Amino acid sequence: MTYIFSINDGYNCIKVGSSYGLIRNICKGPCDESEPVVFLERFVEHSDLFTQPLNSSDLGILKVPKLCGNIESVLLSQIECKFVKIPYKEYFVIIPLLHQFI
């Protein structure tokens, strides 16, 4: 499958390891054959949006309050999932894209 990643809203919310964040920049690796590097700003924390009839995290749906303010680099291959970020009250809700699970 082909995925589009960008620094623009709508294309920049991702999961890396057990945390979630926004892509802030994408750079080509040091050599032409090298893997691209993604500069990521992680969300400070995440929690369930709802807990009944099951935890929303079981579906990959999470509530995230704010970003940490630090930028770090990860390899493109470390991205596990792409998300949609939707404003909700004073938080954002992130929802995984369905086509990634087919």
Image (cartoon, helix red, strand yellow):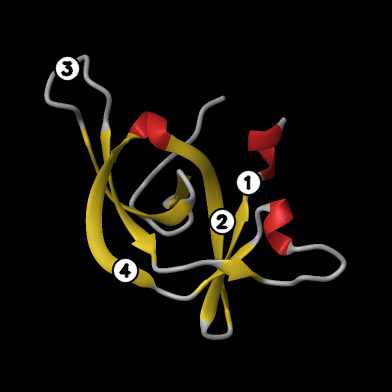
Element class at badge 3: loop
Q: Answer few, some or many: residues within 10 Å of disc 2's Cα (few below 14, many 20 plus, some between 14 and 19).
A: some
| For residue 28, side relative to residue 41 (left or right) | left
Of pointers 3 and 4, the one earlier in the residue sequence = 3
Residue 97's tag is: 1
Q: Which mark is residue 84?
A: 2
Q: Residue 67 appears at what percent x and percent y?
A: 36, 69
Three-letter code, disc 1: Leu
Residue type (three-letter) at the residue carrying disc 3: Asp
Instruction: Report x, y in % for residue 31.
Output: 13, 19
- Distance, label 1 to label 4, CA atoms, is 24 Å
Distance from label 3 to label 1 (Cα)? Answer: 30 Å
Q: Which mark is residue 68?
A: 4
Relative height, residue 89 to residue 40 (above, below): below
Mark-to-mark CA distance, 3 and 2: 31 Å
Q: Residue at x 52, y 78 (%)?
A: 91
Are dots 1 and 2 in contact, CB under 8 Å?
Answer: yes
CA distance separating discs 3 and 4: 32 Å
The C terminus - image quarter:
top right
In this figure, which residue is indicated by the disc labeled 3?
32
Q: Earlier in the sequence, mark 3 or mark 2?
A: 3
Q: Position of residue 82 (x, y in %)?
A: 52, 45
Lower sequence index among marks 2 and 4:
4
72 over 43 or under it: above or below: above
From this view, report whether residue 2 is shown above or below residue 43.
above
- Residue occupying the far top of the picture: 33
- Which residue corresponds to the image point at 40% horizontal and 68% vertical from the top-left? 44
**Secondary element at tag 4:** strand
* Of the two numbered discs 3 and 4 in the rendering, the one whose residue sits closer to the viewer: 4
